[in-house]
């Protein structure tokens, strides 16, 4: 999902950071929990972001920001698709 908002070089660095910090299963589970958290916030289903995970380091902040960027892109894509549909009718 990040390839739509990160360059391949930055994505490669992010994956290196993930591999040096967490095993794949832990990183994946955190990413899924954070994605659900952020999407619910961005689409207005909840008023504030929950605190996901146990650590509060630079990796977590970077991942949350990537997920926020992806989520806002999904929101805007959905908004403009609906706007275009209404305009065509």
Image (cartoon, rainbow, N blue to C red):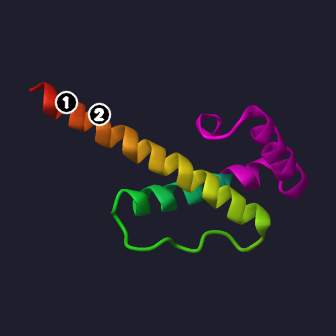
Question: How much space separates mark 1 and mark 2, taking CA atoms?
Answer: 6 Å
- The reply to whether dot 1 and dot 2 touch (C-beta < 8 Å) is yes
Compared with 34, 19 (above or below) is above
Question: In the rendered image, which quarter contains the C terminus?
Answer: top left
Question: In the rendered image, which quarter contains the N terminus?
Answer: top right
Task: Count neighbours of disc 1 (C-alpha within 10 A) and say few if under 14, some if 14 to 19, many if 20 or more.
Answer: few
Observer-nearest of 24 and 80:
80
Please, which residue is most extreme toward the left here? Answer: 89
Compared with 55, 10 (above or below) is above
Q: Is residue 39 visible?
A: yes
- The part of the image, by quadrant, that contains residue 62 is bottom right
Q: Main secondary structure of the magenta part?
A: helix
Position of residue 19 measured from the top left corner of the image (x, y, whole percent): 86, 48
- The residue sitting at 19% across, 30% down in the picture is 85
Observer-nearest of 61 and 54:
61
Reply yes or no: does residue 22 show up in magenta: yes
> Residues in magenta?
1-28
Position of residue 49 measured from the top left corner of the image (x, y, whole percent): 49, 71
Q: Is residue 62 left or right of residue 74?
A: right
Residue at mark 2: 81
Compared with 40, 79 (above or below) is above
Residue at mark 1: 85
Q: Is residue 59 left or right of residue 31?
A: right
């Amino acid at each position: 999902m990040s390839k739509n908002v990160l360059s391949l070089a930055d994505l490669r660095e992010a994956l290196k950071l993930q591999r040096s910090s967490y095993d794949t299963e832990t990183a994946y589970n955190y990413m899924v929990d954070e994605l659900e958290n952020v999407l619910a916030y961005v689409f207005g289903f909840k008023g504030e972001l929950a605190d996901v995970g146990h650590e509060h380091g630079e990796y977590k902040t970077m991942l949350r920001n990537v997920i926020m960027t992806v989520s806002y892109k999904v929101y805007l894509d959905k908004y403009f698709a609906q706007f275009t549909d209404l305009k065509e009718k």
